[in-house]
Image (spheres, rainbow, N blue to C red):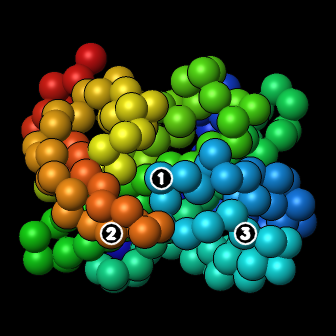
Amino acid sequence: MLKPAYPIETPRLILRPYEIDDVPAAHAFHSLPEVTRYLYWEPRDLDQVRERVAEKAQVRELTDAGQALCLAVFERETGALAGEVVLFWQSREHRQGEIGYIFNPAFHGKGYATEASREMLRLGFDDLELHRIAARCDGRNTASTKVMERLGMREEAHLIENEMVKGEWTDEIVYAMLRREWDELP
């Protein structure tokens, strides 16, 4: 079980569950075609974002496999919503998880996705005691693969045209890290 104490603070960021007041700032990036380009969903309108934020706001802990904890990521200096990170608890028996991230392009290039995702790895390995955490992305999303590499994850698979996404066949890249690899990081 994972019950984080909020807010979670990193050197430059604050992570916490979404609140309904975060809807306008979340809409600012969930509505952008460049943000959803490599995702399964299209840009979202305000009502769709409100619905998703309300769903995400209800999950503040992970009590069993099959759940996902999505945290809003705020820039500490300005208080601005920069993006979101998620930790999926995929299997209790096999101690497997997955991380993901979505960031507002206005905050790209600052290392925030790496900093926030590192915290999700910490929660997964140290608090939830997972054995393996994966991350995956569309094969064309080189920015995302760079984040995974900066986290110290290793590429495990490059699946060729394995999914039909938005009307076209796309590759999928899978990165992962084991608990022992996490423990060996500087």
Seen at 30% across and 56% down, the residue is: 170
Q: Position of residue 43 (x, y in %)?
A: 68, 64
- For marks 3 and 2, the one nearer the N-term is 3
Q: Is residue 180 above or below residue 64?
A: above
Q: Secondary structure at mark 1?
A: loop
- For marks 3 and 1, the one nearer the N-term is 1
Q: Amino acid at mark 1?
A: Tyr
Alpha-carbon span between mark 2 and mark 1: 11 Å
Per the image, the residue denoted by label 1 is: 38
Q: Position of residue 9 (x, y in %)?
A: 63, 38
Callout 1: 10 Å neighbours few (<14), some, many (20+)?
Answer: some
Select label 2 or label 1 by which is in front. 2
**Relative horizontal placement of residue 127, taking residue 43 as reference (left or right):** left
- For marks 2 and 1, the one nearer the N-term is 1
- Occupied quadrant, residue 154: top left
Considering the image in quadrants, where does the C terminus appear?
top left
Seen at 40% across and 78% down, the residue is: 67
